Image: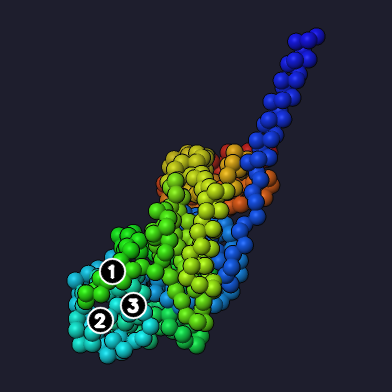
Amino acid sequence: MLIRTFSRTVLLLLLSLLIFVQVQASMIPAPPQIAARSYVVMDAATGQVILSKNEHDRYPPASLVKIMTSYIAELELINGNLAETDMVNVSEKAWRTGGSRMFIQEGTQVPLIELLRGIIISSGNDASVAVAEHIAGSERAFADLMNQHARRLGMHNTHFENSTGLPAEDQYSSAYDLALLARALITDSQQYYPIYAEKHFEFNNIRQPNRNRLLWRDDSVDGIKTGHTNEAGYCLVASAVRDGMRLISVVMGSASEETRAQETQQLLNYTYRFYETSQLYAAGQSISQQRVWGGEQDEVQLGVAENLALTLPRGQQERLEVVLDLPRNIKAPLQAGESVGAVVVSLDGEVLSETPLVALQAVEPGSFFKRLWHSILQFFMNLIS
């Protein structure tokens, strides 16, 4: 009797401990109160928004515009349309452009890679205009190109009027759109992205610091761009990597240079403390093997075309439910990459993700007799079911 009572007590203690651990794992404090017009924190791997406030509202972007300017220049370099050693003519317009400057001189020629550093590190308005004119012939034409890329990236609350971010009527963006742009920059321009972490740039015997204070304060931060005008306030797009998880933070309309740095640091620290990225399936990984009717092969491997990952509160991954939503019959022919269903991921009954399930290889039609035989089999199987 004593042993039985002791065993029951131990079991109850273990059960209570398990419940306590689960409750602790699911407890997350409210996000920090951020002194800014709008902000967003996005997981760079998944594109998932973790924290946000007024993320789709339109505001003047100030020098955050230059992220698009440098992004386009980098794409032109990567695609082989330009070379780092290209000598760029400095026009009078570029030389006279006010605000933050790289201090290039009218009538000179400057290597494109130097101008790119001047845009990214020194936030040079003069360098931005020079690069815009070199790529598109004029800054106006370059702004049209910027808007084309914005539409391609799904930046629905963004419109560009110039390459610098200097105040202009009908020039605006949103925190979410700028996070999309930063994600594209990190993904598409990996060879030039390290420039965004450089702390100083020297040109013409003038040495200027990167205005992103977090580069000095937080070793995990490696970019991206600051911005400020009286109309826009103080803005910062930052990115950091900790334990393999890359976050993008956008803060718009804060009160000072120090405030934008502190608020960004708060957002990053909070998100890294209470969230994690769960890698579920890799692109091309076989998730399921299914019967195929009327094909040369009788089975097909199914998976996802892109990595499937989710950003979750820490400790929630084990509670995920993954269901494969498949048609009753899969019939040939199938092309590689063709969608044949979906991977549905839920947490406590709430659908978090619905990703196409695709054929990982092509399945050609079988012979006439095989297709006929399969049709007969399907007919009788449907009758039975």
Q: Say what secondary structure mark 2 lies in.
A: loop
Quarter of the N terminus within the rendering: top right
Of the numbered discs 3 and 2, the one sitting upstream in the chain is 2
Q: Nearer the viewer, residue 31 or 359?
A: 31
Compute the Cα span from label 3 to label 1. 11 Å
Quadrant of the rendered structure where residue 315 is?
top right
Of the numbered discs 3 and 1, the one sitting upstream in the chain is 3
User: Which residue is label 2 attached to?
Assistant: 104
Question: Residue 81 at x, y = what percent?
Answer: 25, 72
Compute the Cα span from label 2 to label 1. 13 Å
| Picture residue at 62% right of the left edge, 57% below the top | 31
Q: Callout 3: few (<14), some (14-19), or many (20+) C-alpha neighbours within 10 Å? A: many
Can you tell which mark lies on residue 124? 3
Q: Say what secondary structure mark 1 lies in.
A: strand
Question: Residue 291 at x, y = what percent?
Answer: 52, 39
User: Which residue is label 1 attached to?
Assistant: 201
Is 15 located above or below residue 171 in the figure? above
Q: Nearer the viewer, mark 3 or mark 1?
A: 1
Q: Callout 1: few (<14), some (14-19), or many (20+) C-alpha neighbours within 10 Å? A: some
Q: Say what secondary structure mark 3 lies in.
A: loop
